[in-house]
Amino acid sequence: MQRYFIDEVLQINETYTDLNIDTHHIFNVMRMSVGDKFEIVDKEKYVFIALIENKAPFTLKIIEQLKTSQSNVEVTVFTPFLKGDKLDFMLQKCTELGASRFIFYNGQRSIVKLDDKKKEKRKTRYEKIVKEASEQSKRIEIPPIIFENNLKQIDFKLYDAVYIAYENLSGNVSKKFIDQLHIDNQKIAIIFGPEGGLTEDEVNSHKEFTTVQLGSRILRAETAPLYMLSIIDSFYN
Amino acid sequence: MQRYFIDEVLQINETYTDLNIDTHHIFNVMRMSVGDKFEIVDKEKYVFIALIENKAPFTLKIIEQLKTSQSNVEVTVFTPFLKGDKLDFMLQKCTELGASRFIFYNGQRSIVKLDDKKKEKRKTRYEKIVKEASEQSKRIEIPPIIFENNLKQIDFKLYDAVYIAYENLSGNVSKKFIDQLHIDNQKIAIIFGPEGGLTEDEVNSHKEFTTVQLGSRILRAETAPLYMLSIIDSFYN
């Protein structure tokens, strides 16, 4: 059943008219009509089944509340801007794979530099991608997109564990990722570098960082978060 | 260092002229010149460092042999044709994540149907994608692309374990994927359905199949193999 998100609080057995919901998608893309049902997630992350009672004005009745279970682990993905449309894909897949939040930072070796206007446009596009991926993968919340400045300025004390994907740690052998996970750590941050990699300065900028090695091959920047999220999901759930 | 594949046997300290290698990529994309080095994987999967001695005729000297380690586990990905360019992305990412071989089959609910001419074109494109992804991720072999008919006709006795990603197994709860892996199973097959899912007929067509559940969310067809390959890599390596 198709799922939609709404920024209001809903109640069982109530009827609502002209809610702010994507009726174009409901009627033109999904080709639903009066009498059809869909899932709806309200502002407080409760999931309901809604019945379409009228097309114009758009009227629906909340007829059932669904049970939901949510993972306790919360994963924040720190990502630089990347070239081309790699980030579109990365955001979509990471949303399916359970990312809780995306924080963009300017990497010291980032090739992509964006001015404020471009950033604003990107934010709108990224928010659309993660919303659609959340609906598709039946999540109960949409991961927020946050733009920060650089890694050094971020407060990592908020997290129980911070994993940084870094291949060429001079003098040190990075540890296998799965062996570094602990069930007690519920607030996790994972950090990836840009195409040119992270600098030593960035890697050494916070004592909270655990550098980890991701498998036996070299992964592209946009593949690394998919690998880590898959393993986190499998470990915690 | 850039890596290229070549379909010949090479030897250390030998000099070669006009090998069948992508010189356009070497000189125009990577902008290398005489005196530069790159990695080269020969027909027998040995990895060498080659030094460019001359541009035309293109001459290189094999100056060093690199040690290689390879995973013992061999993963064959069974995939239907999917809509749009999802497969391009899926093949690239699965190659990075260690897939050994791709076998395409016609799913009973497949939306995409291809005639022989279109199949031939797809094969050429897919082979280019996996070759480039193999070079980029420094693999020592390029996963072959194989087209088969349908799932029923495939002999799954060749594999130690066959995992089938199937969400709605009526009456049965699918098992968590990682719990189904065994270190002794070295030849693994993973099977994904098309956008419309696998039919019960397909799921029940071979007694070798173990149906598994992939994490706590609903994954798109092209995301499921990334999830499984990440977990396999982490489990075996």
Image (cartoon, coloured by chain):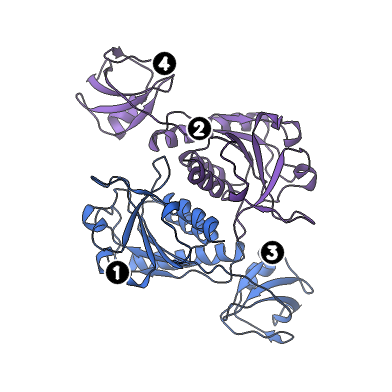
Chain colours: A purple, B blue
Residue A181 sits in which quadrant? Answer: top right
Q: Sequence order check: which comes first, mark 4 or mark 2? A: 4
Q: Nearer the viewer, residue A62 or B195?
A: A62
The kind of residue tagged 1 is Ile
Label 4 belongs to which residue? A8
Per the image, label 2 sits on a secondary structure element best described as: loop
**What distance separates the C-alpha of mark 4 from that of mark 3?**
53 Å
Q: Nearer the viewer, residue B62 or A167?
A: A167
Query: Which chain does the residue under circle 2 lie in?
Result: A
Image quarter in which the N terminus of chain B is found: bottom right
Please tell me how crowded label 1 is: few (under 14), some (14-19), or many (20+) other residues with Cα within 10 Å.
few
Label 3 belongs to which residue? B30
Identify the mark at residue A72; answer none if there is no mark.
2
Quick check: can you spot residue B26? yes
Q: Sequence order check: which comes first, mark 3 or mark 1? A: 3
Q: Residue A9 in the image: x percent, y percent? A: 40, 15
The kind of residue tagged 3 is Met
- Label 4 with label 1: CB-CB less than 8 Å: no
**What distance separates the C-alpha of mark 4 from that of mark 1?**
51 Å
Write the residue at 62% across / 45% down: A82
Label 1 belongs to which residue? B154
Query: Which chain does the residue under circle 1 lie in?
Result: B
- Label 4 with label 3: CB-CB less than 8 Å: no
